[in-house]
Image (tube, helix red, strand yellow):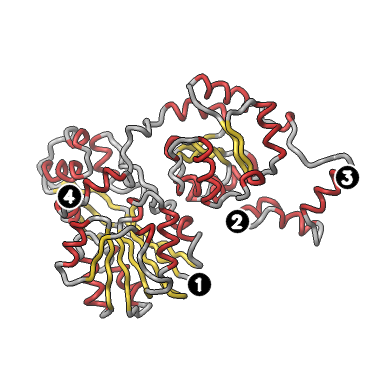
């Protein structure tokens, strides 16, 4: 019964309410306390691999903490029996998982950037997805009913690490690249360099072809936008302005574009589109001002992703629609296999995008598509990698006399407001 409840994504307390209709957790806790049997965590409840794992992590020079949806009284037990440097609870913080504020509070208590924190949990919805959204290293542990059932969810694949026991954690963390030297798609310096001009973007756009006629991500996006018959549309991160222009022409609506890059704004305005410099995490528009919004291959560039998604929901009218386009983890797999490298780390992907949008939209549909990148020669493939700051990988490219084809993994998310 508990397994079925978990698989449905429902509150596990439903199981107890089925067995005992009218069950109230707070009432039962008070009754247990009054009977001298308080509901509390005890030393015997710790998994046997917990202490060895903590010791091994400390030997690596790491600060170890614990945080979860518990009452404040549990904090003392964790400090006293495990000697943890950082302990937090939903009761003490006044906010519970999976709220973004819970993970922001952890980063604040730790005093480090979120990317320097590895968050370990057994639930995809409460641990993995919100940790990813916060910019942390998400570790899914397949332990207990949630851990085993959620391990089968496709969203579990988005975790940076997947382990079966805490004994595996120290070695798994040691194998990760150092976040201090790893470039992510939402690093401010990377984003500024990428869009200082349209040159790098145009180099990448030039190699892409849809797998089937009429099935490019842009084609699908236009069709989903047209279904709403928008009068006014906002595009954030318009790049060269080509899609904004297409929206204006095919949807016959007013289009407003916003980008943090002055060069992208100039390129878009040159097409006759109203374009302004701004931040998607602080949109300069009134609530409900637009019927539709578009964020094509740009949400993974945003440092404060949850705030940006909330802002996009805010400026949409009731029933309004956001169309967001991104890529999956398998994007360009043949190209990166050829050079023995990995893609830049992404915070908004095919695998984790739906959960992040669902926090602010009533309905989210995911449409997975296929595409292909065709590189005419080695120089074209090297130029593509160089636009991403991956010159070292470009130098590893083998020679090839025929065009090199790599698979794309684009996804279109369609998110509707209530």
- Image coords of residue 207 (percent x, y): 17, 53
Q: Secondary structure at mark 2?
A: loop
Q: Which residue is mark 4?
A: 200
Q: What is the CA distance from the residue labelled 2 to the residue labelled 4?
A: 42 Å
Please give the label number shown on residue 34: 3
In the rendered structure, the answer to whether residue 301 lies left or right of residue 95 reads left
Q: Are marks 2 and 3 in contact (CB under 8 Å)?
A: no
Q: Residues within 10 Å of mark 3 (few under 14, many from 20)?
A: few
**Point 21% across, 46% down: residue:** 193
Q: What is the CA distance from the residue labelled 2 to the residue labelled 1?
A: 20 Å
* 71 vs 293, nearest the viewer: 71
Q: Secondary structure at mark 1?
A: loop
Q: State the image quarter where residue 310 is shown.
A: bottom left
Q: Are marks 3 and 4 in contact (CB under 8 Å)?
A: no
Q: Residues within 10 Å of mark 1 (few under 14, many from 20)?
A: few
In the rendered structure, the answer to whether residue 406 lies left or right of residue 223 reads left
The nearer-to-camera label among 2 and 4 is 4
Q: Which residue is mark 1?
A: 418
In the rendered structure, the answer to whether residue 40 lies left or right of residue 406 reads right
Q: Residues within 10 Å of mark 4 (few under 14, many from 20)?
A: some
Q: Earlier in the sequence, mark 2 or mark 1?
A: 2
- Image coords of residue 302 (percent x, y): 35, 52
Q: State the image quarter where residue 372 is shown.
A: bottom left
Q: Which residue is mark 2?
A: 9
């Amino acid at each position: 019964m508990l397994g079925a409840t978990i698989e449905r994504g429902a509150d596990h307390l439903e199981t107890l309410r089925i067995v005992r209709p009218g069950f109230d957790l707070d009432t039962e806790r008070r009754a247990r306390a009054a009977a001298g049997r308080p509901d509390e965590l005890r030393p015997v409840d710790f998994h046997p691999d917990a202490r060895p794992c903590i010791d091994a992590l400390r030997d690596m020079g790491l600060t170890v903490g614990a945080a979860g949806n518990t009452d404040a009284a549990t904090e003392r037990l964790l400090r006293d029996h495990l000697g943890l440097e950082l302990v937090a609870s939903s009761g003490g913080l006044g906010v519970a998982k999976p709220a973004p504020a819970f993970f922001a509070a952890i980063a604040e208590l730790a005093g480090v950037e979120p990317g320097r924190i590895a968050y370990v949990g057994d639930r995809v919805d409460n641990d993995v997805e919100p940790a990813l959204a916060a910019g942390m290293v998400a570790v899914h542990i397949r332990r207990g009913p949630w851990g085993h059932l959620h391990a089968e969810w496709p969203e579990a694949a988005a975790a940076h690490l997947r382990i079966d026991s805490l004994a595996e954690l120290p070695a798994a963390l040691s194998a990760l690249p150092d976040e201090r030297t790893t470039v992510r798609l939402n690093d401010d310096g990377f984003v500024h360099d990428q869009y200082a001009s349209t040159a790098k973007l145009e180099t990448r756009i030039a190699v892409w072809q849809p797998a089937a006629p009429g099935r490019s991500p842009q084609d699908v996006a236009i069709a989903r936008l047209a279904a709403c018959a928008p009068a006014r549309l906002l595009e954030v991160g318009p790049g060269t302005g080509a899609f904004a222009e297409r929206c204006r022409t095919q949807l016959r609506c007013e289009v407003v574009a916003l980008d943090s890059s002055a060069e992208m704004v100039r390129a878009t305005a040159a097409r006759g589109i109203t374009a302004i410099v701004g931040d998607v995490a602080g949109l300069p528009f009134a609530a409900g001002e637009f019927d539709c919004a578009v964020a094509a291959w740009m949400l993974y560039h945003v440092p404060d992703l949850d705030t940006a998604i909330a802002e996009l929901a805010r400026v949409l009218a009731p029933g309004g629609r956001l169309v967001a386009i991104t890529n999956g983890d398998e994007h360009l797999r043949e190209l990166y296999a050829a050079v023995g490298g990995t893609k830049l780390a992404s915070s908004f992907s095919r695998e984790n995008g739906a959960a992040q949008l669902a926090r602010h939209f009533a309905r989210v549909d995911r449409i997975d598509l296929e595409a292909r990148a065709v590189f005419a020669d080695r120089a074209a493939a090297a130029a593509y990698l160089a636009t991403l700051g991956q010159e070292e990988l470009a130098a590893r490219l083998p020679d090839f006399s025929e065009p090199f084809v790599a698979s794309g993994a684009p996804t279109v998310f369609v998110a509707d407001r209530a």
